[in-house]
Structure formats: structure tokens, C-alpha cells
Image: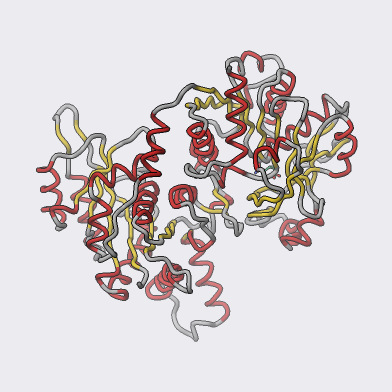
Amino acid sequence: MKTKYIFVTGGVLSSLGKGLASSSLGALLQTRGLSVTIQKLDPYINVDPGTMNPFQHGEVFVTDDGAETDLDLGHYERYLNVPMSRKNNTTSGAIYNSVIAKERRGDYLGATVQVIPHVTDEIKTTILSLSEGDSAPDVAIIEIGGTVGDIEGLPFLEAIRQLRSDLGRDNCLNIHLTLVPYLRCAGEHKTKPTQHSVKELLSIGIQPDIILCRCEQSIPAEMRRKIALFCNVDQDAVFASVDVENIYEVPLKFYEEGFDQKVAIMLRLPARNAHLEIWEKLARDYAEPRGKVTIAIVGKYVELKEAYKSLHEALHHAGVDNRMSVALVYVNSEEVSEGNVAAVLNNCDGVLVPGGFGYRGVEGKIAAIRHARENRIPFFGICLGMQCAVIEFARHVAGLEDANSEEFNPLCAHKVIYLMTEWFDFRTKNLEKRDAGSDKGGTMRLGAYPCKVLPGTTAFDAYKKPLVEERHRHRYEFNNAYKEQLAAKGMVFSGLAPDDSLVEIMELPDHPWFLGCQFHPEFKSRPMDVHPLFREFIRAAKKYAE
Ligand code: GLN
């Protein structure tokens, strides 16, 4: 079978959940025995979101092959349970970058380089690259970022308009996600924003085949008929995407609506039944927890939950696995001090310090870690969280008062966390870039690296295997010069690079559960395949709560 393409556009306003809708549809098609991939096209000019402030754009999701991508790729992985790669996300910036590079090389042989056809061709090539090779999926879902009507999204929309005639009608489907608000005072749903949004799409030559309506409550049949009539779609091609409490229920809701059925018919996909057992079990387990644990996330980006998207999801996966509901308390580390930490963390069954950059808020994180260590509260440090745990231990247990990370104080006496310049040299070959000081993109240790796990440790108890692969996104590393000194005081280095050159996991054995890792395990947690470190952290929190 040739790869069939589904294009998902969004109308009316942003944040309607195109990513979740695409992921949920993908998951449903997968349960019908089809192989599915999803690609996100982002209209902004940044080459990737790696340089964007998490306050603005939310989390930067990292793939195995080291791409810094949009957080929607995290949803794709969590719903499809297949790893995404660099191929699954592109931006206007990346497209233009490549077009301009070609132009400079003279690849266009003297042509005037234009948005149409050169930029649109580049977009089409990126989309079609998904169906190349032996592992071409049965279905590729293409999610177009932004909202129809945005100037910057036009080249992407033009590209998908053209693809329909390139690939043939039976091989492409356009789904438009809109908002159908319910006006309480009028007591009815309003379809006008949807009509306008579809009119906008039609004006650029795209006729949606299916309208997916995000709404607070289900839409009555006569409203659906009205939308179908005004938007030129089949009467049975208007679906509701109703707000849910648990996002992993969306595939079940879509199935109840017959959404995947209609997609399968319109694309002439092989008629196999959907198998929803895993999704049903997940929804059941989520709805019936046997207890509750409270986890404090002590970080800097607490105002915007999207900044910790994968972390949030991984903790909930671990909660469902332990049959516990997980209450997350986001604590702004800038407001934590030795003086108030006991009060702030009172009632918490676990403390988690996530990744981050820069010195702001670090002393608060260190105070929280000290409190967790001394009071035997389960502690999980991720990336910067591990680095802070090492600093805390060096200062308060090993007596290295002026211990710090080179990132926060390059002049400190004990750089227990430091910049391994050699590292950039032989692995990323990015030393040149970093020294130039101007290029901030892609200068980190990024993507999946192997990690040896030492038997007899908390880490091994979780993973139950001697070699794992985890994803990284950081510049600084544990300084091996302090390994012996810290080990003598009780720190165990339970995860190492296969050649022993890098510390990947540290833990404290005389504590119920105290572990820090240099990588980001949250990127690999799936609802149906919970990450072992999160599972054990929540288990430890549950014990602590009891
Ligand atoms: N700022 C730290 C570093 O660059 C940690 C990064 C992170 O937590 N992702 O090494």
C-alpha cells in the first residue's frame, strides 16, 4: 500500500489540541493494524525551537537522533509508542535555510528563487520524505502549526493544496479542527467561527473533508448538519472533540464518534477493526486510583505548565502504573530558601528538580534538595536537578563549601559540574561554534546515548538491565576529578557512559530513594510503557506517604 496522507489544519484560535487530535487519530489507526507516523510543520522562522524560551514555547522535546523539536512530538511518541526523529518536525526557518543554501550553491541554475515553487517544493519534499524507503508508513498525518489565516502559514497550506493533485484524491484527506463555542446565555452552540475559518481555507483552495469541532459539550445533530451544509462536507463528516479530564481518553471518544471509521472509509484504508483494549485499560486505571501522592516540582518555569509537558505526563504515567493519583505542586525555586523550605515542602511525598538553564533559582533548588536528603523524602533530580544534587552534596556532606557548576560560577573553588570542552570536540564537533559565542543553536549534547547501569543500585532495581539508552540535552557534565572524594562520603555513581568517561546517574544508598540523572528520562515515558525511574520514584513516594 502507498502511504496515505492526512493533513490537519487548525482554525479560529490556537491551543485547540491539534497535536492531541492528530496523535489520537494516529493511535486509533494504529489499533486497526496500520503503521502511522506524524509530522509537525511549524510556521515560525526559528530553525528549531531549541533557542526559544520555554516560557513562550513550552518544552523542547528531544528525539533519539538529537533533534530539538516541538512538544507535540512528545504527544506523537506517547500515543503511537514509536520514536520520532528529525524528519517528524520542520519549521519555516529550516525550510528557508535549506532553500537559501541551495540558492548559494547555485542549485537553482540561475532561476529567480520564489516562495512558489521553490519554498513550496522544499516543503513538499520534506512531507514526502516520510513515505520514502522500505519503512514507509501506511498513513502519515501532517499537522500544520498555527491557525488558518496566519500570513506565515501560507506556504505550508499552498504546499498541501498542491499535494492533493500530486498524490491523488484517494491518497489525501484534509481535516480541519475548529472551535464550536457553547454560548451559555443563548443556550446553544455557535457555528459561525467554523464557517469563517472554512471560508478562509477555501479561499486558498483547500476544501476540508472532515471538520473536527472542539467543544465543551457534544454537538447536537442539527448543528452538525448545519456545519456540514455551510462547509460543504458530508453530513457524517462533522465530529465533536469534547473536553476530557484525562487526555488518554481522547482516542476512545473519537472512536465513539466514528471519526477513525470515516477517515478509513474516505481514504479507502483496509477495513480492519480497531482494538481499543489498551486505551480502555488506561482510562479505567486512571479513573480508579487507590490513593494519592503529592509531588513538588521545584523549578523555574512553573508559571507555564507546558514547559514541563513530558515530565508532567511521565509522572502521571507512573501514577497510573502504581494506581495512585499524582498531585503536582509546582514550586517556584526563586521563592525557596533554607528558611522557608520546610514549610514549602510540607505535605509533599516526593521532591523533583527538573532540567533548566542559568543560575536564577538554583539556590532554592539546592535548599529543596538538602531538605529532601536530610528528611529522607524521595528525591528525583533530572539533568540540572542532578547537577544541583551533586553541588548540594559536595557543599554540605563533603565540606566543599564553594562547590558549584561552571555554568553558575566559573570562578568557584570546586567546579563539581563543568564544561567538558574535549567533549564538544570529539562528539559533536561543535567546539568551534561554541567558542564563536554567537551561534546558540545545537551546541549541546543532544539525543540518545548509552548508559551502563551498575547492578545492586536503585537505578538497576528500576531498569533491571545493565545497559540502557537515554536522551540528553545539556552542556555541562559531572567533573570526574571529584568522583573519589564524593564516593568516599557515600555518593554512588550508578550510571556511567560505557567507557566510564561520563557520570550519567548518581544516587545515595543510605536514603530511601535519592537519584539524579544527567539525561531526561521523561522523554521516553509512555502511558503503556512507563519509564522505570518514574515508576520507582512514585512507588517510593507512595511508601513515604504511608
Ligand atoms: N544547564 C545545564 C546544562 O546545560 C542543565 C541542562 C538541562 O537541565 N537540560 O548542562
Q: How is the image coloured?
A: secondary structure
Q: Is residue 507 visible?
A: yes
The residue under the point 59% across, 56% down is: 64
User: In the drawing, does residue 488 fall left or right of residue 219?
Assistant: right
Image coordinates of residue 257 in percent, x first then y, are 23, 46
| Residue at the far bottom in the pictured view | 109
- In the rendered image, the quadrant that contains the N terminus is bottom left
Image coordinates of residue 18 in percent, x first then y, are 36, 49
Image coordinates of residue 146 in percent, x first then y, are 38, 52
**Which quadrant of the picture is home to ligand 1?**
top right
Work out whether 184 lies above or below 506. Answer: above
In the foreground, 22 or 32: 32
The residue under the point 40% across, 54% down is: 145
Work out whether 102 lies above or below 155. Answer: below
User: In the drawing, does residue 246 fall left or right of residue 264?
Assistant: right
- In the rendered image, the quadrant that contains the C terminus is top right
The residue under the point 38% across, 66% down is: 138
Work out whether 240 lies above or below 337. Answer: below
In the foreground, 26 or 62: 26
The residue under the point 48% across, 33% down is: 320
Q: Quadrant of residue 510?
A: top right
Count of marks, rendered view: 0
Work out whether 289 lies above or below 344. Answer: below
Image coordinates of residue 365 in percent, x first then y, are 68, 28
Q: Is residue 41 visible?
A: no
